[in-house]
Amino acid sequence: MRCRILLSVLGLALGAAAKAQQDQIVVGYYPSWKKAMIDGMDLSQYTHINLAFGIPAASGTLSFEGQSFVSSVVADLHAKGTKVLLSVGGWTGSNLISTILKDATTRKTFMDSMVSYIKDNNLDGIDIDWEYPGRLGNTCNVIDEAKDTPNFLSFLQDLRAALDAGSAKDKKLITMAVRVEPFDVDGAPSKDVSAFAKVVDFANIMQYDINGAWADLTGPNAPFDFEKDKGLQMSFVSAIDAWTGAGWPANQLTAGIGFYGRSTLALEDMTQDPKNQYQPQSKVVPLGDKEDAPWTDTCAGTTGNSGVWQWKNLRSEGVLTSPTKAAAPWVRQWDPVSKTPWLFNPDTKQFISYDDPQSIKAKIDYAASKGLAGAMVWSIEMDYNGELIKVVKNWDGSNPSLSNNNNPGEKKPTEEKPSEEGNPEEEVSSSADEVEPEPSNVPLNNEGFVAPVSGGACETNGRLECADDTGTNAAYMFCVNGKWVAMKCGEGTACLRSGDSVTCGWPKN
């Protein structure tokens, strides 16, 4: 009977976990100019695909340069159960939105164009990526600091009514891509955006591009948290706090994850101060990966490189030989505050800040623990063999990664699952009596190490122990219903025991 009760409770827990996985929103942006790279990709892991970008004309009409393939892409994605939206605006397509919304005629044309485009192309909704209401984004954008945000709200309310009237049985979505702070009014972030959330299904926070070549110091592209008085004082965490603090429900937000990094040129040898990722840098942006090339900003009238390194090219070009190991002469470091890796090449003084499975895991766990609806990815073609999207899909709100310890993956005894930042790839026995519940970090005895054996007896359910004490072996054991179950830390990491704590972290030298 006790066994049946345990299995029933375990079944309920697993059922709840499965429902959480099923309900998670995973939004992927599909750049139309990258279609050739996206063809053949498995996009079934995304619940929503946003086609980027629909560009508004001064009259309010919309155009999309990928129009020739919309019908086939929509049909293919719908067959997989994925919703498809058109994303309107973007960095270079937001310059006229402020002007369009000020005039009654162009405003109505803009709204009618969205409604028609959804209907004509069998889409599931519209995503508005206005960068940014009340604040200058691209240098040639028109802005109105006082009226942009209220005009935007009024427009969205009318768009919601128009979409609901035209598709009563099939509700169409309105989503938005938003910056790390709420929309500006009179030069400051709005203190109350709750009215927006009543007509918008969810907002995708762009929690990246926070530091870059525009700053005086190198710094993290997408920090989990910021370091006081270093770099821009914004982060993944502060963005969630800013939006929820202004009245936007957490369950209508998705956390933005960049599948790329940004490179800059340091002015000093950063290996001389390897724990400090904030060091003087040049304003000259180096060439990024093999897909980067000089481009002309027609607004600013300048030509330069983006410096972008996509995850797939960090891996395929051999900069990273594994998700956590750099090839010489590159040196990889981990910052415990921003919870992001960074690379430095002493020969070229090139610095790259990026996200990897380890940093994404920390963000996803935190977002889930805060009750967010899911995650958003920019952009889908930048992944490498699914290494990043599988971490994004591992949605579990019970174990946020909040440690600020210097060792990535190291946890205090009182914290949750020790393998969070080590990104474990768990190996679970197929035997019915060895089903794995969510592991938690249970304090261990300080006695001498005794290697556990898979299938052998254990006393404390939830206890974790390394398979050996070498500090180089990825294998560890998890106590389930009195038996040890074999598990494994993520690629490039090892099981480490420190006092009462077992973690997945960097192997011992």
Image: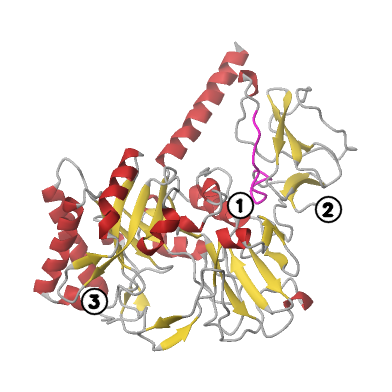
**Residue 147 higher or lower than 194, as above or below:** below
Instruction: For marks 1 and 2, give the CA distance.
Output: 22 Å
Helix or strand or loop: what does disc 1 sit on? Answer: loop
Instruction: For marks 2 and 3, give the CA distance.
Output: 56 Å
Tell me if I can see residue 174 in this picture: no
Which residue in the structure is indicated by mark 1? 401
Helix or strand or loop: what does disc 3 sit on? Answer: helix
Q: Quadrant of the N terminus?
A: top right
Percent position (x, y) of residue 103? 13, 76
Q: Amino acid at mark 3?
A: Ser
Labels 1, 3: front one: 3
Quarter of the view holding residue 301: bottom left
Percent position (x, y) of residue 101? 18, 73
Q: Earlier in the sequence, mark 1 or mark 2?
A: 1
Labels 1, 2: front one: 2
Q: Earlier in the sequence, mark 2 or mark 3?
A: 3
Which residue in the structure is indicated by mark 2? 508
**Residue 427 higher or lower than 372, as above or below:** above
Query: What residue sits 56% from the left and 55% below the top?
Result: 360
Instruction: Look at the image and say whether residue 474 sits in the magenta stretch.
Output: no
**Towards the viewer: 94 or 235:** 94
Query: What residue sits 62% from the left and 15% below the top?
Result: 3
